[in-house]
Amino acid sequence: MDFRQMEAFVNVVKLKSFSKAADVLFLTQPTISSHISGLEKELGVVLIDRANKEICATKQGRVLYNYAKEMINMRETALSTLNGDGNTGFRDILEITASSVPAQYILPGILFEFSQTNRHSKFIIDQTDSRQVIRKVSDNEFEIGITGLKSNSNRFVSECIAEDKLVLITPASERYAQYFNTELNPDIFIKEQFIYREDGSATRKKFEKYLESYGIGSKYINIIAIVNNTDIVMKSVVSGLGVAIVSKIVAQQFAQNNDIFIFELKESIAERKFYLIYPQNRTLSPLAKSFSVFLKNRCRRGNLLSSYEKNVYRV
């Protein structure tokens, strides 16, 4: 085995494509195929399943993938230290898995800022729910994650990078205008038709805890739709399908067009945080380590989530 073979293998698995791996490594596709075939021949096992349309690792390939990533990260860390300037001489790919709000409202701006001083870097961004973010980082599918759920496992480092809060959003209709400047009891709005987030969503979990503080179980929620996409939730409310609980930063984007009404939940339990997570005892690539430091420093300078106060009503 040599590092050229290992690097080719890792990038094929990571990008699920021989051609994309070739582009990233500045090699030809036949060269990538040759490296993989040579590695398989040397080890005596099939590492890549080529039978399906989507390239993926075999069972043996998944085992090797974890070791290969660790070896490459350690090599690049050593080269970075020796060079003294953080430059390993290789094109880096930063892999991030994030829940919906961080993926849509934190990462775009942050990645732009980061790329200004790391122009050689490329990014792979995966959007999923918070529970899957933790699983994917745990399974080494992605190096780091950003999620609304804090992992209590000592296998992870979980660091707060942004603060937000949950709000109730409704269609911008006269029916809901009557509640302006009043304190709505959950017993009133719980009867509304809810566009609800999927199981595994940090927003859903946080809202259910909020209701529990009033002695209201989730079985009393009148759910008309379960959605795993924030934009669909918002557009469903705008259309009049029902109401929803979302992050304030998300709601404020739509409120600018007067499409919805926003009602704040005054209890502190409605406040939420977003966390950067990564494995405690796994070697991060120099790029992932650099990005985590950048993210934390950026957080210290102010909340990563922009603040808009238009059309916000307290309940």
Image: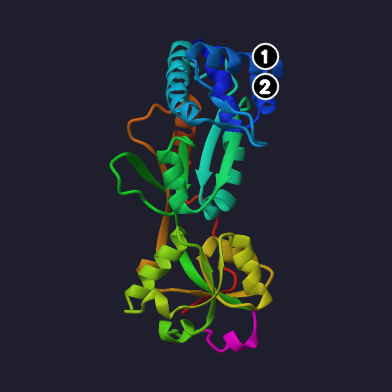
As displayed, is residue 9 above or below residue 153?
Answer: above
Residue wearing tag 1: 31
For marks 2 and 1 on the same chain, the one whose residue lies earlier in the sequence: 2
For this rendering, which residue is in front, 291 or 196?
196
Q: Picture coordinates of residue 177 (x, y %)?
A: 59, 86
Left or right for 40, reference 275: right
Q: Picture coordinates of residue 271 (x, y %)?
A: 40, 64
Residue drawn at x 57%, y 66% as measured from the top left: 251
Disc 1 residue crowd, few under 14, some 14–19, many 20+, Cα 10 Å: some
Q: Nearer the viewer, mark 2 or mark 1?
A: 1
Identify the element where label 1 is drawn.
helix
Left or right for 276, reference 257: left
- Magenta-tinted stretch: 172-180
Residue 80 visible, this angle: yes
| Residue at mark 2 to residue at mark 1: CA–CA distance | 8 Å
Residue 97 in magenta stretch: no
Left or right for 241, reference 292: right
As displayed, is residue 313 above or below residue 66?
Answer: below
Residue drawn at x 56%, y 44% as measured from the top left: 126
Residue 267 visible, this angle: no
- Image-quadrant location for residue 237: bottom right
Left or right for 288, reference 108: left
Q: Which mark is residue 107?
A: none
Q: Picture coordinates of residue 111 (x, y %)?
A: 58, 39
Q: Are marks 2 and 1 in contact (CB under 8 Å)?
A: yes
Residue type at mark 1: give it.
Answer: Thr
For this rendering, which residue is in front, 202 or 57?
57
Residue drawn at x 54%, y 17% as measured from the top left: 40
Residue wearing tag 2: 22
Residue type at mark 2: give it.
Answer: Ala
Question: Looking at the image, what colour scheme do you see?
Answer: rainbow
Identify the element where label 2 is drawn.
helix
